Image: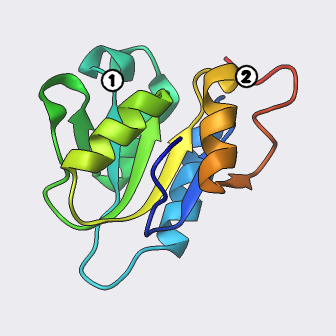
């Protein structure tokens, strides 16, 4: 159903600690000359999530959006915040140089079949249990 990835894939439960958990996983998969990039559906999502915005500012990460199919300017791990499976597939189709992918789960019901089909690693608390965060 979904395309297999040539890179490691992980999912993280949404919530206040999600950016830190996703960032730590991505740093474990960071190679020489690579940088972590963060994808959000729209810039508005950053204004509405102070934890993610602070994380991005602290580490000076590049941010790309689902609008206009932005792609990372440098190779490295990609954090996709609240992306649905179709957005993940579309972003990876257009983005070259993604060496690892970590998705902060927005909708567990949509994300679980995708995550299981691509063999995504669950990092931290499972996003599939009740109370998946806000």
Image coords of residue 129 (percent x, y): 87, 29
In this picture, residue 20 sits left or right of residue 81: right
Disc 2 versus disc 1: distance between alpha carbons?
18 Å
Q: In the depicted view, which residue is nearer to us: 132 or 111? A: 111
The colour scheme used here is rainbow
For residue 40, what is the image quadrant?
top left
Considering every residue shown, the one lying at the far right of the view is: 130
Q: Which mark is residue 53?
A: none
Quarter the C terminus occupies: top right
Q: Nearer the viewer, residue 21 or 107?
A: 107
- The x and y percentages for residue 9 are 55, 58
Q: Which residue is mark 2?
A: 133
SS of the residue under disc 1: loop
* Spot occupied by residue 29 in the image (x, y as percentages of width and height): 49, 73
Q: Element type at marker 2?
A: loop
The residue at 43%/69% (across/down) is: 6
The percent position of residue 20, horizontal first and vertical second, equals: 58, 49
Give the residue at x 36% y 43%. Answer: 56
Tag in front: 2 or 1: 1
Give the residue pinned by disc 1. 41
At 17% from the left and 64% from the top, the residue drawn is 74
* Horizontal relation, residue 49 to residue 36: left or right: right
Instruction: Determine whether label 2 and label 1 are within 8 Å by CB.
Output: no
């Amino acid at each position: 159903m979904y395309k297999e990835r040539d890179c490691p894939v992980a999912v993280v439960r949404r919530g206040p600690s999600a950016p830190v958990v996703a960032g730590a996983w991505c740093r474990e998969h960071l190679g020489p000359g690579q940088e972590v990039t963060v994808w959000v559906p729209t810039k508005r999502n950053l204004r509405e999530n102070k934890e993610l915005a602070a994380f991005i500012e602290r580490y000076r990460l590049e941010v790309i959006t689902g609008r206009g199919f932005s792609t990372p300017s440098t190779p490295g791990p990609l954090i996709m915040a609240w992306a649905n499976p179709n957005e993940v597939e579309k972003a990876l189709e257009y983005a070259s140089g993604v060496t690892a992918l970590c998705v902060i789960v927005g909708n567990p019901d949509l994300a679980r079949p995708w995550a299981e089909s691509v063999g995504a690693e669950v990092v931290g608390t499972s996003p599939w249990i009740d109370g998946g965060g806000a």
